[in-house]
Image: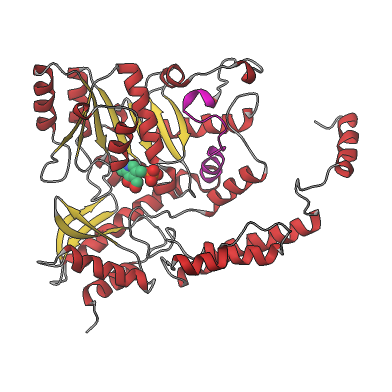
Amino acid sequence: MSEDGIEASHASDTQAHPADSLGLGIKEMRLLAHWAVDRVLDHFEHGARGPAIRESSSAELLAALGGPAPEEPGDPLQAMETLVDVALANMQHGDHPRYFARIPGPSSFAGVLGDWLGTGFNAIAASWPGGSGPATAELVVLDWLRCLFGMPDGTEGVLASGGSLANITGLIVARKMAGAGVAYLSEQTHTSITRGLVAVGFPPEHIRVLASDAQFRLDVDCVRAAIDEDRAAGRRPGFVIATAGTTNCGAVDPLGALADLCAAEDLWLHVDGAYGAPAVLCDAGRAALDGIERADSLVVDPHKWLFQPYDIGCLLVRRAGALADTFHMSPEYLTGASTGQGEVDFRDRSLELSRRARALKLWLSFRIYGLGRMRAAIARGIELAEYAESVVQADARWELVTPAQLGIVTFARPGATAADHAARADALARDGYAAVTSTALRGRPVLRLCTINPRTTEDDIASTLERLAAWPGS
Ligand code: PLP
């Protein structure tokens, strides 16, 4: 694409147009960019020596970051240093090898590079004419994910900011396709789903939160009984919402049996695999997730166990055309080149119009690392949880509550209260050594490790458990 005319006009453009829309010069931009790259590399190289989490008071943070919006330009390096040393220093470092709380974010460098490039080029993935390259990258990664999960050809998808939005987007599609009806879920279902159902107008009688079984899984018999009860009461059953890897303890609902039930009852099966679905890549996870390929809609969060920086969630929908049937729009001010076969306007697949090209980072990560490395990294997370389980089992100060499941293990101090567990977790977080979650399983206070960072060592786990057990340090 180097016609002389175009090159000549580009050359004069370079003189006519400053590099930065708000006036930084190119030399200064390079200097600042290299500084930023070095800080990020320092983070990757040395971040593990720093805290896993750090929090400061609002007053301290506002003293450094607040004040009136500056009228005059400031010193860029000074501002960037403040950003790194204050804003970026005070947060959970989900990529730290001893960040075991919530769902860690063990972001990989290739993911960062992909995000940087997309942001640097201000990539947009809203319409085909406006971003055919980014849209193709999105179609490609969606199809890679579809294949990994074993969903059939024709399955379509869309990337969203994360699991909450991907889940609710899927449930909006489900309701559009299947009509209004009752949704069945368990008390272990991620709360963003219940919140989302309410927000999109499911009435309370259409949200059936059922008690999970002894292993914290959605109980098929319980769902069947609730369906019968609803039909008898004149309500229309509509959707089963299964979880493939619960946030609390990594439990996987009985996906195959739920898929059978949905087939028999003509219900839509939505599977929330935001956390656990990537485990299909390795042998141990694949067995646990058997049946995931039968979902009508499936969510996975690459910013969790596919090693991507925030934000990227993914929704896959089995029925071709369902996304566009739900979200298509074509106002006169958006008309452009018409889309042909294989050309997708992603604005038609969710509630977003202007949208970041989230696929770029995942595309680059697959290309740079290959599936093999991702597989090994996921398998390592599962092994680390099994190691944590063995340490807990060998220590009389702990009681195992749920075994290692998809990278999560829960345990308790015999007889301990929630306050005792929370104090132990807080003490670890306060000195920044590690971050763990204090939660409850059906009312029982537990501590919880999520070990999906492949950079974590066995020592990291053993020392974290030791400090937790030894608190307040005798
Ligand atoms: N679903 C599950 C199972 C999760 O674990 C989470 C978050 O941890 C979500 C949904 C929500 O994902 P996000 O935080 O990306 O919105």
Is residue 410 found left or right of 116 in the rendered image?
A: left
Is residue 161 found left or right of 428 in the rendered image?
A: right
Question: Is residue 71 in sight in this rendering?
Answer: yes
In front of the other: 203 or 226: 203
Which image quarter: residue 122? top right
Is residue 70 found left or right of 330 in the rendered image?
A: right
> In the image, is residue 317 above or below residue 93?
above
Give the color scheme: rainbow, by chain, secondary structure or one colour: secondary structure
In front of the other: 392 or 272: 272
**Residue at the extreme bottom of the image, as rendered:** 474
Magenta stretch: give its range.
347-366
> In the image, is residue 200 above or below residue 321?
below
Question: Could you say where residue 143 lies in the image, as x and y percent from the top left?
Answer: 47, 30
Which image quarter: residue 275? top left
Indicate the quadrant containing the C terminus: top left, top right, bottom left or bottom right. Answer: bottom left
> What residue sits 14% from the left and 53% below the top?
443
Question: Could you say where residue 330 lies in the image, as x and y percent from the top left?
Answer: 56, 16
> What residue sits 16% from the left and 65% below the top?
393
